[in-house]
Image (cartoon, rainbow, N blue to C red):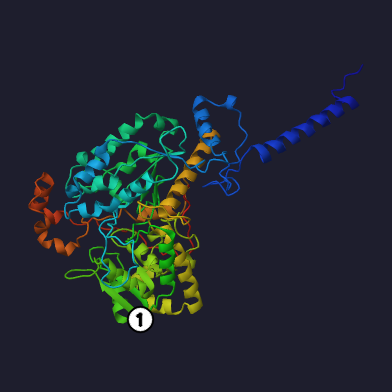
């Protein structure tokens, strides 16, 4: 036989090859369309999480898993329990040593150098009942809540959470009731870095030794730090540097940390609403309030409650106050030196309730409590910076920002190119009415209901936050089972460029404007006896503000921006 180098297939071989190709295509089709779940970013889609607490998971063989992945899978299997209303919602709350929470409340007089915080810790963290001197409140549910009390409120709400479990093997997520904000507030003004970091280092050491921590290395753990993120991101160990380094600890970087203002450039902290003064006990109280705000007579086009920030060169508050004073359509509540009613909740709420638009420029940091007080009053917020709300409260506010708010470029105000009055007057009455309806719809989701009660059907800020955390942890579990890397897209988007221009923004002097500190020492109580007080008395002029510093070209974000955060 002659060998030519060619190979000829017989009919039988051709048939077998054809069958093999067909089977191969069938297997590939089955693999990609049936066995593998979609790999989109962020939360599982609605097709992934069903309304009956059951979950469509990829088809896994436990024999293919390592022991660690088997533990992850066992938690996910609990979703598919149609007879269990808490399937996929169980949370285990760590019983941490009292030094990390209750002991702080027992010594509440030491929580703040400038004021006694004890009155704000009563009523499960809601503070004292308020008197309605201006007729601006509804009949019940109004408290003098401190803006930094959210971790205490959240902890007491978690104690009443319907799906709280004492069996950690059932839990999807793990709550750490560490009062991080109350802890750091004790030492922000003069405490050395060792003292400021001590509780943070101690709680992370305690967590590392818990068996629940070892399953996911903390990625299924979450806690509330009830202050702005910059209070927990000290970059150096210099005594003059601000805050502690809680959010920079390796263990905490794996956790989900809830703060009242988050960093747009980091992946482990998420913003939740500042607490307002209204804490309803039942759905009907919210419905009545929404109806009242919907029918309120608003005689003021726009208003502003606040003080200027002359010590911050880039602040636009001064220009805003000037424009308000010149306009017959604006009402101003000045909160600067001397006698001021800005600390009287009924006065502030009355102003917002009679206003169509409420101006919300940056304060000492990107955000301010007033944002949520104005939404509660049915007043349409006007923002001047993307990080004041849009990139912050993604779990609680609409992603379509123009439906409920107005955006005016901060740089246009700074350079006096825009009249706020003209911008707002150009908005049609129909558009205003539509926006107000959207604002009023947001009210339940930005409130914290009274921890001593349960809402029937409405979801408040606590409910929305817990669901978002559960979804985030579930997504982490699936990614880890599939062997996918958990990444944070915020490190590569256009916010990264902004990070170069804007440094850490925070205040060194809580509750007191810089001019008030010209006689600084008299604010220090004589009853205080620690070294911090002595140092402040001797060098009070050096403890005022860490100013907002902006370098390079100022950029106005005119294009619609959405913060791409992994949830």
* Residue nearest the viewer, comparing 561 with 391: 391
* Residue nearest the viewer, comparing 456 with 292: 456
Q: Residue at x 35, y 64 (%)?
A: 373
User: Residue lying furthest top in this view?
Assistant: 1
Q: Is residue 292 left or right of residue 129?
A: right
Instruction: State the SS at label 1.
Output: loop
Name which quarter of the figure residue 459 lies in. Answer: bottom left
Name which quarter of the figure residue 332 lies in. Answer: bottom left
Q: Is residue 400 above or below residue 421?
A: above
Q: Residue at x 50, y 74 (%)?
A: 431
x and y, in percent, of residue 421 in the image: 38, 78
Q: Is residue 502 above or below residue 370?
A: above
- The residue that label 1 is drawn on is 329
* Residue nearest the viewer, comparing 549 with 333: 333
Q: Residue at x 29, y 44 (%)?
A: 179
* Residue nearest the viewer, comparing 252 with 235: 252
Q: Is residue 418 above or below residue 549?
A: below
Question: Is residue 34 visible in this depiction of the protein?
Answer: yes
Q: Residue at x 54, y 39 (%)?
A: 79
């Amino acid at each position: 036989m002659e060998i030519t180098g060619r190979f000829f297939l017989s009919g039988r071989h051709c048939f077998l090859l054809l069958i093999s190709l067909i089977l191969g295509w069938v297997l590939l089709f089955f693999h990609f369309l049936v066995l593998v779940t979609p790999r989109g970013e962020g939360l599982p889609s609605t097709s992934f999480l069903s309304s009956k607490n059951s979950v469509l998971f990829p088809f896994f063989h436990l024999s293919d898993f390592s022991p660690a992945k088997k533990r992850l899978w066992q938690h996910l299997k609990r979703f598919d329990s149609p007879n269990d209303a808490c399937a996929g919602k169980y949370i285990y709350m760590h019983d941490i040593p009292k030094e990390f929470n209750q002991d702080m409340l027992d010594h509440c007089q030491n929580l703040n150098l400038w004021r006694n915080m004890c009155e704000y810790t009563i009523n499960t963290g809601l503070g004292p009942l308020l008197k309605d001197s201006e007729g601006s409140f509804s009949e019940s549910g109004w408290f003098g809540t401190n803006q930094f009390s959210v971790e205490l409120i959240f902890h007491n709400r978690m104690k009443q959470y319907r799906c709280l479990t004492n069996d950690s093997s059932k839990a999807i997520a793990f709550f750490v009731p560490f009062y991080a904000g109350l802890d750091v507030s004790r030492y922000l003004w003069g405490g050395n870095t060792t003292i400021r970091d001590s509780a943070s280092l101690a709680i992370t050491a305690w967590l590392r030794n818990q068996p629940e921590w070892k399953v996911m290395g903390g990625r299924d753990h979450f806690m509330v730090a009830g202050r702005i993120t910059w209070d927990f991101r000290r970059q150096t160990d210099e005594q003059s540097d601000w805050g502690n380094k809680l959010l920079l600890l390796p263990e905490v970087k794996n956790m989900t940390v809830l703060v009242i203002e988050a960093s747009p450039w980091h992946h482990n902290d998420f913003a939740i609403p500042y607490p307002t003064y209204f804490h309803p006990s039942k759905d009907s109280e919210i419905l009545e309030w929404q109806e009242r705000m919907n029918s309120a007579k608003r005689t003021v086009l726009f208003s502003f409650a606040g003080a200027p920030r002359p010590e911050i060169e880039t602040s636009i508050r001064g220009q805003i106050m000037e424009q308000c004073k010149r306009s017959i359509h604006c009402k101003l509540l000045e909160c600067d030196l001397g006698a001021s009613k800005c600390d009287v909740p009924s006065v502030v709420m009355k102003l917002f309730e009679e206003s169509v638009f409420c101006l919300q420029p940056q304060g000492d940091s990107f955000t301010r409590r007033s944002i949520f007080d104005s939404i509660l009053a049915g007043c349409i917020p006007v923002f001047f910076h993307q990080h004041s709300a849009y990139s912050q409260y993604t779990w609680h506010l609409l992603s379509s920002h123009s439906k409920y708010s107005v955006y005016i470029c901060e740089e246009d105000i700074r350079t006096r190119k825009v009249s706020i009055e003209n911008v707002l007057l150009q908005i049609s009455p129909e558009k205003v009415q539509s926006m107000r309806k959207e604002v009023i719809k947001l009210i339940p989701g930005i409130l914290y209901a009274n921890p001593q009660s349960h809402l029937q059907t409405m979801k408040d800020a606590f409910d929305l936050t817990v669901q978002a955390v559960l979804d985030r942890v579930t997504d982490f579990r699936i990614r880890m089972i599939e062997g996918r890397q958990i990444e944070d897209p915020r490190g590569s988007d256009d916010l990264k460029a902004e990070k170069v221009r804007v440094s850490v923004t925070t205040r060194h002097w809580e509750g007191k404007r810089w001019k008030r500190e010209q006689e600084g020492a008299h604010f220090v109580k004589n009853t205080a006896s620690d070294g911090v007080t002595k140092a402040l008395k001797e060098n009070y002029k050096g403890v005022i503000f860490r100013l907002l510093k902006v370098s390079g070209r100022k950029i106005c974000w005119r294009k619609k921006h959405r913060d791409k955060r992994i949830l």
